[in-house]
Image: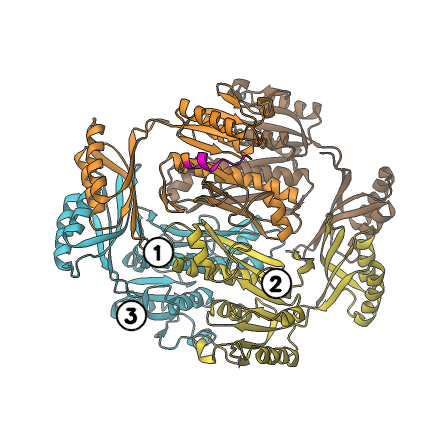
Chain colours: A cyan, B brown, C yellow, D orange
Amino acid sequence: MTDPSFALTLSCPNKPGIVMKVSALIYEAGGDIVTAQQFDDTLENRFFMRVVFRCATGKMDVPALRALLATLGDELEADWQLRDRSQPRRVMILVSKFDHCLADLLYRWRRGEQAMDITAIVSNHPRETFNGLDLSGLRFEYLPSTKETKPQQEQKLWSLIEETGTELVVLARYMQVLSDDLSARLAGRCINIHHSFLPSFKGARPYHQAHARGVKVIGATAHYVTADLDEGPIIAQDVEPISHGDTPEDLIRRGRDIERRVLAKAVRHHLDDRILLNGSRTVVFD
Amino acid sequence: MTDPSFALTLSCPNKPGIVMKVSALIYEAGGDIVTAQQFDDTLENRFFMRVVFRCATGKMDVPALRALLATLGDELEADWQLRDRSQPRRVMILVSKFDHCLADLLYRWRRGEQAMDITAIVSNHPRETFNGLDLSGLRFEYLPSTKETKPQQEQKLWSLIEETGTELVVLARYMQVLSDDLSARLAGRCINIHHSFLPSFKGARPYHQAHARGVKVIGATAHYVTADLDEGPIIAQDVEPISHGDTPEDLIRRGRDIERRVLAKAVRHHLDDRILLNGSRTVVFD
Amino acid sequence: MTDPSFALTLSCPNKPGIVMKVSALIYEAGGDIVTAQQFDDTLENRFFMRVVFRCATGKMDVPALRALLATLGDELEADWQLRDRSQPRRVMILVSKFDHCLADLLYRWRRGEQAMDITAIVSNHPRETFNGLDLSGLRFEYLPSTKETKPQQEQKLWSLIEETGTELVVLARYMQVLSDDLSARLAGRCINIHHSFLPSFKGARPYHQAHARGVKVIGATAHYVTADLDEGPIIAQDVEPISHGDTPEDLIRRGRDIERRVLAKAVRHHLDDRILLNGSRTVVFD
Amino acid sequence: MTDPSFALTLSCPNKPGIVMKVSALIYEAGGDIVTAQQFDDTLENRFFMRVVFRCATGKMDVPALRALLATLGDELEADWQLRDRSQPRRVMILVSKFDHCLADLLYRWRRGEQAMDITAIVSNHPRETFNGLDLSGLRFEYLPSTKETKPQQEQKLWSLIEETGTELVVLARYMQVLSDDLSARLAGRCINIHHSFLPSFKGARPYHQAHARGVKVIGATAHYVTADLDEGPIIAQDVEPISHGDTPEDLIRRGRDIERRVLAKAVRHHLDDRILLNGSRTVVFD
């Protein structure tokens, strides 16, 4: 699963010459571009770029490259990130009772579909809740939460994130709302799966809401978590047709399939450095 | 396009024996069932049925059949409708400036895809707005509407509906809100196409709303018109994936394709007696 | 998961009165129809019917009902089957090395999505191949097969099917071709998942074939097994768009998602008595 | 509809520095990149690039830019094309009796969705075949063809293509097979819509073939025409689910919707310089 390449993601105000300058810099550092994508948001006049490159010459001086990028980044007023793709990202998965997304992520991870190291599985339900799943070799933390204990438990969670060097937190049907403070600290690196086609049916029991409204299509939405519940930047959505014959329970069952594949796609794109934030929206280079 | 068959649609409180009683009645009247669909809404304890049958014996005594159905309908406390499918329904199409849905309906009608007679095209824009379309042989009525003239214009519209024997009114991107009164009079026989995936993005400029929210899928919704704007029973919905690269104008362009096929499907299902109302929702036997 | 209802499936030459006769018989036996679907194949003049009914009166005389159905079945020259839905079907799953379909079926079964009892997991690979999966409480049979031992192994397989009372065999990416004889004995009760959108790309390595041809959509097909390889009646198909950037390995990965959901759907429909054979095709009441 | 920008498409053996060299050249010529896409086919070791740029400085010296590109193209052993997007491409549409694709292309062209000038509509059926369509202002050529006259008629067709400066030929359900010679002369600039999900159901009456096989999904395929019938590089495909209830006539009707949107997409992508040939496959930057 190790991938001997680097990913550069960059966004900045648009002006002529960005592609040339970035690609020249990579070329001079001995890099060979494997794939590159650009997007010019003409409405916002902002430029977005993702470049994956490998070393063409056997040895790449990464610190030197970073220094050059820092200089260019300043010149372009750019947000940028350079990542060594041979290092899988460190991912923590949070889950409540419904384990279909967790089961799916674990299966894909074992198959090598998701390039990540799992730092811990954290749940507000005890380990035996997940007896049907093979958690062997994985750290499991039981962090029950009540209205009273929530602040302490979030503090424990944050300590765990820091201690384990977690880079991405995945809310795989985690039915606890994160505090504004924690949401802010995890900005751009906490992905939630919402079981509706946002912005329809925010809040609780979206499949019951969908049934009551009589929609003919249901969906799920993966988004980055922000303090504003169910309003974070959307990463991926998918839908399925339903019919009058589907009960709320049928929608929940069908929804499980949609949720797991939408979340898997969002996590995969994040791990693959394909997502850039564009205000309250995302640029997804797929 | 004439179809020598009959369609019976029926809904009533569920109890044992309905299928038997209805099918026996059809059999005794000389009918041969071509297709039949039933749905038992166990949450509402209401039963829905659609039966299409042809005459097995050469001659069917329709008035006698109606009389028998009236008796059975009373016994079952049923809403029912018997329709002779050799008579195309009489349909009026209302349109404002955007004519893609109108163009599509006309093309399908000329190809024989929609079993209807068009009573009139009505618009709040003058006939020359639609110069690109072939309206030959079709009645066109220009009914401009201002805040002040709206009541009179709606009265003219209603007179036209009555005079022409219109059975179904299609709002093919008609950008005028019908009054509560007219909505009520057209209950269950007025189909609107809304250019969003309801209940997301109600109201004006839904594609701009969708762009601003950063959704990854857009859609369109065909529904029966009720006094409650954008809240009527949904008949059909469809969606398409979009990306960060799509501007609001791109969404409008892509949306045209979705709108025209969703509206065509809803109209087709209505003309084919496939839609039954179930409170604020629909049963669609497709 | 027990469902106190009965499913009757029936097909016969079309003639007037079938729906009435069948529904009358159910009514007289004390049944209350929950859902019923009919389809008249006018090209073949053959009628298909599925009726699910529960007992309306507290007690249903099933042997008497069967006797009445036998008489009616003779009169109608019908193929028919009456099944007590409180008895889950007995299902054997065959698998080779790729376990994504097996993993998915097991997960759905544990969640109660598939109304079945698993009689055994059978593989031509040893049990440790599936160490990532929880097979606790399940019988596992290792039946390796070579060209020479194939007849004996198929004999063992057949004995196992008989001994365990297996009613449905699922080939969940089982890479061994069944003999004509075994295929015939399992006619209509052995479902295979083929990893292409049949009839495209029959035979080996379909994703490599798809890549070489440059198609823009890939798919998977669930079908009943017949002696004619990859030619059995199709139950379900699904597809996903791909792009020029997808390597054969990407197609294999994407294909896993399609395969598992298509197979799950086909098995679910079979267990739910929704599939009737119509020559080399299927009628699927969904 | 005029777009004051340029599109450069380029493919060549992969080696380091291509993006840099191309983007430097554009920058020095006064261009500002609006969007750029690259793809490295690692299996074939071939690099593909599409760059859209506008003039950043008010005036661009296009001949000078072409000269620079010619030199770079030689160095890279590249196939490349530079196109001024303010000049719509000149397109000829060929059609037989079924006019749904033609009607759709004309509607989109009138709405400004397709950036093209139509040089002529050519048919082997007389003009009155298309009386339902508005062909005003368009050249129509009736070129009936029999086995005997085919060579002469193809000669006439070729003369018409040359005389009108046609750059793209669209076979919008044109039921005549082009000769090998004409196919070769139109390589990479003749798009056909095939009414099946290729490579399934090549040849005649694909919807009847699909019905007979009992597939659960049908589709359509837009591809470049080659001498090898139904084997040309695929540009776009789309599909729709069908059921046992669909007759061959239903498939033909549903297929019309798929065909017109797949062909429109392929033509749009061609006009937008998004398609590059990669042997018998295509790279589509969408």
Residue A269 is tagged as 1
Is label 2 on the same chain as label 1?
no
Chain label for disc 1: A
The kind of residue tagged 1 is His
Q: Residue B147, can we see it?
A: no
Q: What stretch is highlighted in magenta?
A: D176-184
Q: Nearer the viewer, residue A102 or D229?
A: D229
Q: Nearer the viewer, residue A256 or A10?
A: A10
The residue to which callout 3 is attached is: A160
Taking the spot 68% from the left edge, 32% from the top edge, the residue there is B116
The kind of residue tagged 3 is Leu
Q: What element carries label 1?
A: helix
Cα separation between marks 3 and 2 = 57 Å
Of the two numbered discs 3 and 1 in the rendering, the one whose residue sits closer to the viewer: 1
Of the two numbered discs 2 and 1 in the rendering, the one whose residue sits closer to the viewer: 2
* Residue A128 image point, x, y percent: 45, 77
**Crowdedness of circle 3 by 10 Å Cα count: few (<14), some, many (20+)?**
some
Q: Quadrant of the N terminus of chain C?
A: bottom right
